[in-house]
Image: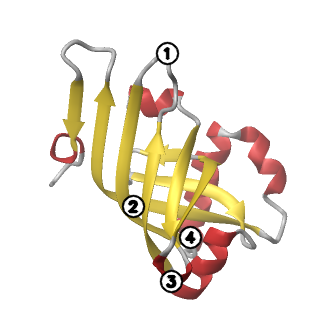
Amino acid sequence: MDFLGKERIGVLTTMIHDERPHSAVLHFSFSPDRNVFYFSTDKTSRKATFLGYTHTSNAALVVGFSETEWQTLQLEGVVQIVADEEELAEAKKIHYAMHPNSQKFESDPDTIFLVFKPDWFRYTDFMKKPVEVVLEDEILPGK
């Protein structure tokens, strides 16, 4: 949780046409209560356009790119467009609290939110000796 609290961007990879991967760097926000990640994006982006047709996609997220801190979090799961009004309100509240500059796009009709629901995690801290590795069973409650 401390690691996710200080990180602001990640690489989200979704499966698009013909099951080809598409990766994009995005600001993320994390809801520990729901164990999901939110992203604000444009509905005309490649990832969003494809999700509009399929509704969900297998996806992966990587957080942590610092050569000085050497911590990374890899996740796998499913991503979809947030369609439920209650969840959309929650996504906006969480995301705009972490990324207030993004709120300027809130009234843009092309702005949508994606929700990523992980089902596998691997956190690695290469600075610790021995290297610390935490797998999903140690992070996800109820697994």
Residue 117 tag number: 2
- Secondary element type, mark 3: helix
**What amino acid is found at the position of numbered circle 1 in the picture?**
Thr
Foreground tag (3 vs 4): 3
Q: Any mark on residue 44, and which?
A: none
Circle number at residue 82: 4
Would you say the residues marked 3 and 4 are in contact, meaning their CB atoms lie under 8 Å apart? no
Depth check, mark 1 against mark 3: the one in front is: 3
| Residue tagged 1 | 68
* Residue type pointed to by label 3: Asp
Quadrant in which the C terminus appears: bottom left
Quadrant assignment for the N terminus: top left
Task: Give the mark, 3 or 4, whose residue is nearer the N terminus.
Answer: 3
| First of labels 1, 3 by sequence position | 3
Residue holding disc 3: 18
Labels 4 & 2 near each other (Cβ < 8 A): no
Cα distance between the residues tagged 1 and 3: 38 Å
Q: Secondary structure at mark 4?
A: loop
